[in-house]
Each structure stands twice: as structure tokens, then as C-alpha cells.
Amino acid sequence: MNETKGNGANPVRFRHALPDGELSGLAWPAPEKPRLVFIHANGFCASAYRQMLGHVSAAFDILAPDLRGHGRTRLTADPDQHRSWDIYAADISQWLGSLDRSPDAFAGHSMGAIISLLSASRLSRPVPLALVEPVILPPVFYLMCQGPLRGLMRGRVPIAKAARKRFDGWEARSDAATRYARHPTFRNWAPGVLDDYLEDGLVEADAGDIRLSCNPLWEAANYEAQGHDIGTALRQQAGSVSVLKAEKGSTIVRPRALTSRGIGIDLMTGTGHLAPMEAPERVADWIGGKLKNTD
């Protein structure tokens, strides 16, 4: 794994070769501390969580990869072939398997929370999980996506339809920043978080214009690619599981899938699904508290 140097509490960038390209991300190195792997949400990237992860960087050796099709990672991302989030767990497992030591804990947000679960379930030893707003949908949704009728899901999921219509193309980064700053989604974000996200959430295209690093077609495909098996992953996960639920707009649609397995759910008041961006320090405190005995 190649790294570039950072200063003080700022993260360093890493790059790691995989068979079909390169996985990139951010790291807060602390070799003497427990290793925490944090995985971001759909459409975002590790840089969007700089403030949140910076708040726990004194307690953990943090690795935060950009997933396939996101941020600075350069791996094949074909929306037409996308079936499940298992592809991400396979990437994470392959990457971690070649590092100097394995993770001591996982944390993740939204899609990243489920990928943390899928990845942890593949480890040879149990590790604790801190899952922020994991995507837990009704069983019928997964059954549709796992069976022969999965093609019917394409174009029928409202959030995916919205993603496909997402504006993508600016003359300059400042134009993108101005557009996003006016959007209601970002008005509740903590100061500076939008700038952190756009640092790696935008990329210069071959034509010279500025594009989203996560192609809207790939983002949309992620919403529809629900062929992974959360139930099996939960049964295989032997480590502790902690879950944080936002007060508004939560993606934990079916909490019983967790509570029936004895997994408690903590409610964070005053936040929406994007709690790590809205209240990075509060979410960091929750993650740190849940994983404080990790070794």
C-alpha cells in the first residue's frame, strides 16, 4: 500500500493495487492503536467524513477507503452488471488480506454500514461493528433483487430514478460548490463538511469539465443492487454490533431485523440520515464510545 505524507491530525492518502485497478482512500495512521476500517455511504467518499473521523483519530489507526466507483478509487464500475454490494465486500477483503495487519473494528454509514457487516462476516476472527444508519429494507425487496425478477427493479426505485437525473457537469469546481451550497440537502451540514466531500467527490473529466467522481448511473445502480444477504452476514458476525439510528429519514426501515437478534438501536435526536455530515462530532463520540474497548 502506497501512502503520501500528511501533517498532524490531517489524513494521508493511500493507494493499493487490485486486479482490475486501484483502491484509494484516506488514513489516520496510529500503528500502536486498534485498527478501524470505516466505509462511506453510496455516492460519497472518504473525504466527506474527514471531520468525523478526525474526532476519533487519537484512539484508532483509521483506514477509510473510497469504494469501487467512488472518490479517487479507479476500479471497474459497470451499472449494467451490478447485482449486489458483495462486490464491495470482495474488494475490501482482498485489500485487507494484503495489509500488515487485519482490522480490529469496522464502522460505516448507510451502504457503508452494510458493506462493513458483509466484510466483517468474511474475517477469520470476530470484530466489533459500529453501524450508522445501515440500510435495512423489507424482506420482499431483497427477494425481488435476488431472484429472476430482479430486472424489474431497474427504474422502479424512486431514489434511483432521482440519482439518474442528478446534474453532473460544471466548468469549475467553484460552480459545483455554489450549486451544492444552495441545495436543501446540504444546509444542515456542519461547516466545512461540504468542502471536504467535494475535494474527492468531484473529478476533472477527460474533456476538462468537472464531474462527480461517483457517476450518477453507478449511484443509481447501487440503490437497486440489493442481491446481498444481510441475514446470513448477521448470523456469521460473531463480534458485537452497535447501531445508530437517525431521528429523521432513517434507512432502518425494518428495525426488527436487528432487534430480533438482540442488537440494540441507539437513537440520535435532531439528525437525519446524513448524521455524520450534520453532527460529525456527536457521531464520532458514539463510534468511539461503542468501540472504546477494542484491542
Image: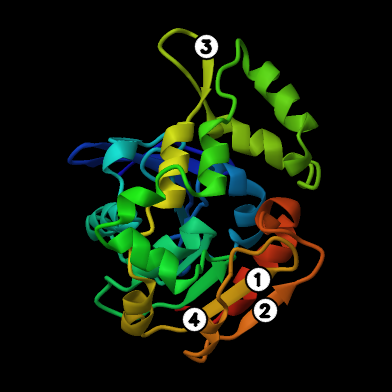
State the separation of the CA atoms marked 2 and 1: 6 Å
- Disc 3/disc 2 C-alpha distance (Å): 43 Å
Which residue lies at the image location 36% right of the left edge and 50% below the top edge? 152
Q: CA distance from mark 4 to mark 1?
A: 14 Å
Of labels 4 and 1, the one closer to you = 4
Foreground of the two, 22 or 7? 22
Q: Earlier in the sequence, mark 4 or mark 1?
A: 1
| Residue 109 image offset from top left, x and y in percent | 55, 59
In this rendering, is residue 294 above or below 144? below
Q: Residues within 10 Å of mark 2 (few under 14, many from 20)?
A: few
Quarter residue 79 falls in: top left
How far is mark 3 from mark 4, CA to CA?
44 Å
Percent position of residue 182, x then y: 79, 30
Residue 149 placed where, x, y %?
Answer: 30, 56
Task: Say above or below: 52 vs 233.
Answer: above
Disc nearer the start of the sequence (3/4): 3
Whether label 4 touches label 2, CB < 8 Å: no
The amino acid beneath tag 2 is Asp
Q: How many marks?
A: 4
- Disc number at residue 289? none
- Taking the spot 28% from the left edge, 35% from the top edge, the residue there is 76
For marks 4 and 2, the one nearer the N-term is 4
Instruction: Say what secondary structure mark 4 lies in.
Output: helix
Q: In the rendered image, is residue 77 in sight?
A: no
What residue type is disc 1 on? Lys
Circle 3 sits on which residue? 209
Q: Amino acid at mark 3?
A: Asp
Q: In this figure, which residue is indicated by the disc labeled 4? A: 257
Crowdedness near tag 3: few (<14), some (14–19) or many (≥20) residues, C-alpha within 10 Å? some
Q: Nearer the viewer, residue 22 or 55?
A: 22
Residue identified by numbered label 2: 266
According to the picture, the residue beneath numbered tag 1 turns out to be 245
